[in-house]
Image: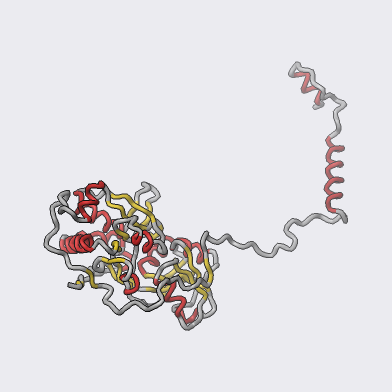
Amino acid sequence: MRAGGVMARHGSRVGLTSRAVPVSLVFAVLLLAVAACAGSGQPVDLAKDVTSVDRPSPVGVEENPKTSTTSTTPAPPCDPRASYRPQGPLPPEGQMPNDTTMQRIQERGQLVAGVDQNTFLFGFRNPATGALEGFDIDRVREIAKAIFGDPNKVQFKVVTSAGRLDVLEKDQVDVVVRTFTANCERWQKINFSSTYYIAGQRLLVDRTSNVTSLDQLGGKKVCAAKGSTSITTIKQNPAKLVPVQVDNWTDCLIMLQQGQVSAVSTDDTILAGMVAQDPNVKLVGDRFTDEPYGIGIPKKNTDMVRFVNAVLEKSIADGSWASSYDRWLGSSMGGQAPPQPAYLD
């Protein structure tokens, strides 16, 4: 149907009539324009010389990082699991003793806790509710309940592995509960509670990989988080691995999924969370370190250390620890008893 006929049917008058430029002429002009762009008359191949596309790396990735220690002398030998003994039974909830760290926290109205939001099973944000959950988060709520009588009186402060010591030394948090390995070097800067869980470093690889140990990865990239004991172990391995450190453990999983690293190596508890998230990766080999998890507390607050240790003892005695373990770790880590506390005094 001619354009003029369509316009007539709608009873309108416009500049477009039967003398409009033919479609065939417009198409011919476009073909000439494309040919002119091609220059030689050959089709333009926009993908020419493109052989690969680099996958984006997470923010903050460092390959072959320098050793991040400010200490010039080794820390003196210690028992990193031994902490300060509780002094008597816990005070009644909401009635903290005068002139104590716990009373100051009670008067403030919230426990300030440094935690993770990216480690599935230990400290992660539930996508359905937005709430922080996990085995470590349960420990935080136990401390809050012991102080206030309310497990929800907590201000969560998300910190990276590398930032754990810093927020404690600067007195920005009351506790850090974040898969935090107690060792002698860290004890020089902060205090730890008694050990509430014992993990061990292992290896995570793609499900198709035949690798079962770090020794098989000479010259290959292996990922761990900044500020973790795991990255130090990778650096020190005699197989001359290529350590890759990131801000958060989920970044390691992403890099493994994208083929940017050959393996992830850290505590088996953290790796178990990655396996639960992605069936295309697997946990291999035996533990080759012991990682006693403690709750980090500022160095000056020894009274808070004793209080937290009393909370942990109560959690073990009344079954709260076991209930939390079964909920978060039982299916992936198997049956496990809580560690027995060790004390300095």
Give the residue displayed 32% in from the left and 60% down from the top. Answer: 176
Residue 121 can be seen in this image = no
Q: Residue furthest left?
A: 88
Give the residue displayed 50% in from the left and 72% down from the top. Answer: 66
Q: Residue furthest top?
A: 11
- Foreground: 177 or 263? 177
Give the residue displayed 86% in from the left and 54% down from the top. Answer: 39
The image quadrant that residue 186 belongs to is: bottom left
The image quadrant that residue 123 belongs to is: bottom left
Q: Position of residue 260 (x, y in %)?
A: 55, 67
Q: Position of residue 140 (x, y in %)?
A: 27, 56
Q: Give left or right: position of 300 versus 285.
A: left
Q: Give left or right: position of 1 versus 287.
A: right
The image quadrant that residue 89 belongs to is: bottom left
Quadrant of the image containing the N terminus: top right
Q: Give left or right: position of 103 versus 199.
A: left
- Foreground: 244 or 101? 101
Residue 93 can be seen in this image = yes
Q: Position of residue 300 (x, y in %)?
A: 26, 62
- Foreground: 219 or 63? 63
Quadrant of the image containing the C terminus: bottom left
Q: Give left or right: position of 107 versus 265.
A: left
